Each structure stands twice: as C-alpha cells, then as structure tokens.
Amino acid sequence: MWYILYTLIFLHETCICITEGRYLLETKYIEVPVDHFSASPKPRFFKLRYLLNDKYHVKGGPAFVYTGNEGDISMYAQNTGFLFDIAPIFNALLVFIEHRYYGVSLPFGNDSFASSDNLRYLTTTQALADFAYTIEALRRTFFGDVLSYDTYPFVAFGGSYGGMLAAWLRMKYPYEVVGAVASSAPIFHFPGLTVGCAAFNAQITRVFRRYGGERCVRTVELGWDAVLNLSRTKLGMDFISSSWKLCKPLKTAEDVRRLLDWLGSVYENLSMFNYHYPADFVAPLPAYPVKIFCDKLTTAYFNDTKGLIDRFATALAIYTNYTGKRSCNNVNGSYEEPAEIAWSYQTCVELAMPKCSLEGDMFPTKSWSYEGHSEACYERFGVRGLGRDWPAMAYGGKNLRHYSNLVFSNGLMDPWSVGGVFSNVSSTVLAFNITDGPHHVDFRRADPADNNYVIEARRFHVRIIKQWLNMV
Ligand SMILES: *[C@@H]1O[C@H](CO)[C@@H](O)[C@H](O)[C@H]1NC(C)=O
Ligand SMILES: *[C@@H]1O[C@H](CO)[C@@H](O)[C@H](O)[C@H]1NC(C)=O
Ligand SMILES: *[C@@H]1O[C@H](CO)[C@@H](O)[C@H](O)[C@H]1NC(C)=O
Ligand SMILES: *[C@@H]1O[C@H](CO)[C@@H](O)[C@H](O)[C@H]1NC(C)=O
Ligand SMILES: *[C@@H]1O[C@H](CO)[C@@H](O)[C@H](O)[C@H]1NC(C)=O
Ligand SMILES: *[C@@H]1O[C@H](CO)[C@@H](O)[C@H](O)[C@H]1NC(C)=O
Ligand SMILES: *[C@@H]1O[C@H](CO)[C@@H](O)[C@H](O)[C@H]1NC(C)=O
Ligand SMILES: *[C@@H]1O[C@H](CO)[C@@H](O)[C@H](O)[C@H]1NC(C)=O
C-alpha cells in the first residue's frame, strides 16, 4: 500500500521516473566529453544517463555510486537491492551511472557501433573518467563545491564488470570515492595473472556437479555429442531445430557452431544466476535453476540420441521459457545486439579474459591463446588490442598492496569467482568469501531465503563502509 501511494505521489512530480520494477529512480543525463584525454578544435559531448534515488538522502549523508556494467543501467539498478536496503542506515543518496556505449548512453547515437572509428572511445579509461566527471558534477549539485570532499564522501559499488570498475575507480581516482565495494569482480582474470584459461569452465562444471550431481555433468557432456552427431544430416538438424523450437532452422555448420556457443552461454548463465530464490536478472529463473535443469535431465537415456535432445529441450526451457511466453528460441540474435557488439569490442581491445576447456570439465575441449583471440578480433573489428599485459599494467595486476579501502567479495559457487580476489591483502584491501554464493548475490536485496553466508557478507560491507565514513 505504502509502495503504491509512493508511486502515485512520485509520478506527479516533474521527473521522468522508472515505474517498471521494484525501485523508483529518477532518470537524469549529463553531457560528458566523448574523449576525456585529447584536445580538439571542436570537442564532442554526448548524453550519459544516470539514475538517482534521494528518498533516503539526508543532508550530510554520503552518496553511493554504482559504476555501470556492460548493459542497460536500469537492469543493474533493479537488481542491486542491497544499496536500497542500506541507504537508510547511512542517509545515502543513490546514483547508478550508465557505462558509455550501453543502454542509451551512446556517444554517436545509433552510429556508435557502425565503425571501429566510432568504437574507439569505448575503453575502461574513458568509462572511469565518465564516472569521475559525473561524481564531480553531482558533488556540485548536491553538496555545493565549497564543501570538502571528506565531509560529503562518495562510495563506489559495482558487481561483476561493474565491480572491476568500482575497484579501478578507487585505484585511479582515490580522491573521488573513499572506498569501493566490488562484488564478483574478476580483476585477476587476465593473461599472465593467476587464472589459467581452464578455470572458468571447470568452475561451471563444479557448480553443476554440486547442485545437479555427477549424472548431470555426464549428461551435459553427452549433449554436445548428441547435437554434433545429429547435425551431420539435414534430417538431424531439422530434428534439433524442431525439438528445441529454434526460430530459424539449422542449415549450415556455422549455424551449429552458434547453437553450441549459445548452449555454453546458457550453462554459464544458469550457474551465475543459481540464486536460492526465483529471480529475474538477465532471464526469469526459478530458485536453484541448475538443480531444476538437472532434474529435468535425469530421465535421459544415454543410448538414445534423439530422446536425449528432447530431454534437453525440456531442461533448457527452464532457462529460455520459465514464464512460458517465449514462442521460439533465437540462438543467433545476440550477435547483432548493440550490447553484444560493445562487449565483444571491449574483450578484444582491453579485456581478454581467457576461457578454454580441458578434459574433465563438461564442455567440449577448446583451446585459447591471446594470439588467436587477437586475430579473431582483428577480423571482426579491424583493430589490434592494447596487448595482453595491458589490464595488469593499467590496474596494478596482483599488486593490490599499493591501494587502500577496497572490498572484494566473491560467491564461491560463481564461475567468475576464479578470477577474483580471495585473500586479504592489507588492513584496508579486504576479501570476503561467500560460501555457496553465486554471482554478486550479496548485492541483491535481502530475502527471507538468504543463508548466513550472504547475510554475513552484507554485514561485513556495512561495517567496512562505516569505517571508511568514520562512523565507528
Ligand atoms: C535509433 O534506433 C532506434 C531503434 O531502431 C530508433 O527508435 C531511433 O529513432 C534511432 N535514433 C536515431 C537518432 O536515429
Ligand atoms: C555420437 O557418435 C559417436 C560415433 O558414432 C558415438 O560413439 C557416440 O555415442 C554418439 N553420441 C551420442 C550422444 O549419440
Ligand atoms: C545467424 O545469423 C547469420 C548472420 O549473422 C545468418 O547468416 C544465419 O543464417 C543465421 N542462422 C540462423 C540459424 O538463424
Ligand atoms: C547470458 O547472460 C549474458 C549477460 O551476462 C547475456 O549477454 C547472454 O545473452 C546470456 N545468454 C543467453 C543464452 O541468454
Ligand atoms: C536404452 O537403455 C534403456 C535402459 O538402459 C533400455 O531400456 C533401452 O532398451 C535402450 N534402448 C536402445 C535403443 O538400446
Ligand atoms: C514456452 O512455453 C509455452 C507454454 O508452455 C509453449 O507454448 C511454448 O511453445 C514454449 N516455447 C519454447 C520456445 O519453449
Ligand atoms: C579478511 O579479514 C576480515 C577481518 O577484517 C575477515 O572477516 C575476513 O574473513 C578475511 N577474508 C578472508 C578471505 O580471509
Ligand atoms: C576463500 O576462498 C578461496 C577459494 O576457494 C580459498 O582458497 C580460501 O582459502 C578461502 N579463504 C577463507 C578465509 O575462507
């Protein structure tokens, strides 16, 4: 009731509000330079979007800034209930800043992805400068530029790639944010740092084994074979297309390759979003979707390829069609989506995160090399990346002891945790393990189904943030 009332009052204000989803946020834009780092006779600016909630803000309270990820910022805002939960404790203003080239924050409008020339301002360095630029502007708007930075501090938050950015923001602009809480941020997942390319898929396999059992892992392994075996003939391809309700029937080997990529992406997402309650982040899913997926596979016979494909169809629907509203599966579509192009470009130019599969995990064996990755990137975008050692050089690699006021939390059942920070580095650069936790589960709102591990993680964050803000 209170919620409905609030909606009505809010809608009559002058702001443009997001009414979809649980949390109400005001949509704002700020003009930022397309290029923060070089002068030109006619500097270009573009509109960067940010979302604001001042419901809990009391003059003197801090600002909590979420550094946006590789997607529409409203999705991340709606799935970061933790900030709304703790804002009242701190009287905090909440700000979610969109990452350039995602959502509606497009430097060249619809042409942003049209050429590598237009894509060249898509770097983490430019994105971090956007965040700092926006924080400076907010400081003037909300707090007045006469006030000292320390009196009205900003704290950075981020999950996943957004978590990497939150940590990097603190590292690069320590005077802008007093600290950063980075959840599920794989800042070590780069060539030359600790993580081997096999770790990621091995971890997905571990999640499936943990929640679905050895038989599920074995069945998933056979699934790849079943697809490959059947797609050797046109009849077989038609069988899969119809069983899996593909929007466009498989025709070529390239189509099959894309189908297999899609399948891998489904497994990755099931394990990342294996939350302990139903959630709608990226896709609507039931509680423990990995377990439900695996339960659907238990009646599969290994000796019956077509039967296996049909069992998979039922299991996959957990991910693709939980709401029952999907008419067909587009396994091909994401290749042309702006966010997919932007993220691929980023992995090509800066963020080459190695992934391969070895014997023993549930994926078909696949190798990875920086050179191969770089070559594929050159083919797709016509540019060479900044080099395999660039991220480590830009952001300190494993030398985190030079920094301060950072918290890295990782769910130990998250595939991305393999590239995360697992141990305390110093008295102010801290790590927090969340036993059984999937992807940035601590940044979701409190839920009655939460276990003690995630509750402890959130308590930990609150305690450390209080220290940063001199509240204890
Ligand atoms: C960009 O594309 C979208 C969707 O195709 C369209 O609605 C919008 O009008 C376009 N904007 C411009 C500035 O061309
Ligand atoms: C695929 O074909 C190979 C070789 O014919 C066979 O050994 C294997 O059992 C088949 N796998 C499935 C899942 O049908
Ligand atoms: C996938 O997309 C490519 C172009 O991007 C197209 O050539 C191919 O036919 C599509 N395949 C399917 C199965 O939709
Ligand atoms: C998996 O999630 C990512 C976002 O993390 C999304 O881009 C991708 O399309 C998803 N894959 C599938 C098959 O839905
Ligand atoms: C497959 O195995 C099941 C159970 O082991 C058996 O009942 C069935 O007859 C087998 N089917 C074929 C085609 O071999
Ligand atoms: C999704 O579920 C609905 C309802 O059960 C069904 O009619 C539809 O065919 C399903 N679509 C896919 C792609 O599985
Ligand atoms: C890091 O230190 C804190 C105490 O400040 C402790 O609670 C936490 O468990 C430690 N993290 C790890 C991963 O050891
Ligand atoms: C945190 O998790 C990592 C990875 O599983 C493990 O190596 C480390 O010992 C854990 N630390 C604590 C304090 O639980």
Image: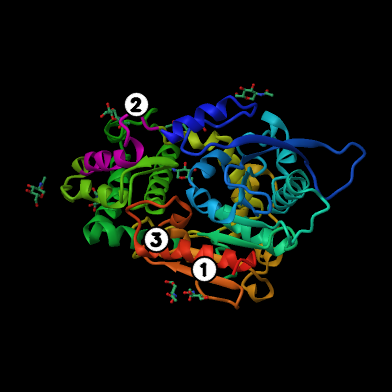
Residue plotted at (65% across, 26% down): 14
Q: Amino acid under label 1? A: Val
Query: On the rendered structure, is 92 left or right of 326?
Result: right
Query: On the rendered structure, is 429 left or right of 135?
Result: left
Alpha carbon of mark 2 to alpha carbon of mark 1: how far?
A: 40 Å
Q: Which residue is mark 1?
A: 195
Q: Amino acid under label 3? A: Gly
Count neighbours of disc 1 (C-alpha within 10 A) and say few if under 14, some if 14 to 19, many if 20 or more.
Answer: some
Q: Amino acid under label 2? A: Ser
Instruction: State yes or no: discs 3 and 1 in contact (Cβ < 8 Å).
Output: no
Q: Which residue is mark 3?
A: 437
Query: On the rendered structure, is 379 left or right of 439?
Result: right
Q: Which residues are magenta?
A: 308-329
The correct choice, above or below, for 314 with respect to 211 in the image is above
Instruction: State yes or no: discs 2 and 1 in contact (Cβ < 8 Å).
Output: no
The residue closer to the viewer here, 35 or 411, is 411
Q: What kind of element bears circle 2?
A: loop
In this rendering, which labeled residue sits more in front, label 2 or label 3? 3
Q: What kind of element bears circle 1?
A: loop
Residue 394: x percent and y percent? Answer: 71, 63
**N-terminal label among 2 and 1:** 1
Q: Mark 2 CB in 8 Å range of ligand 6?
A: yes
Label ID, residue 327: 2
Alpha carbon of mark 2 to alpha carbon of mark 3: how far?
A: 32 Å
Residue plotted at (65% across, 76% down): 401
Residue 419 in view of the camera: no
The residue closer to the viewer here, 357 or 465, is 465
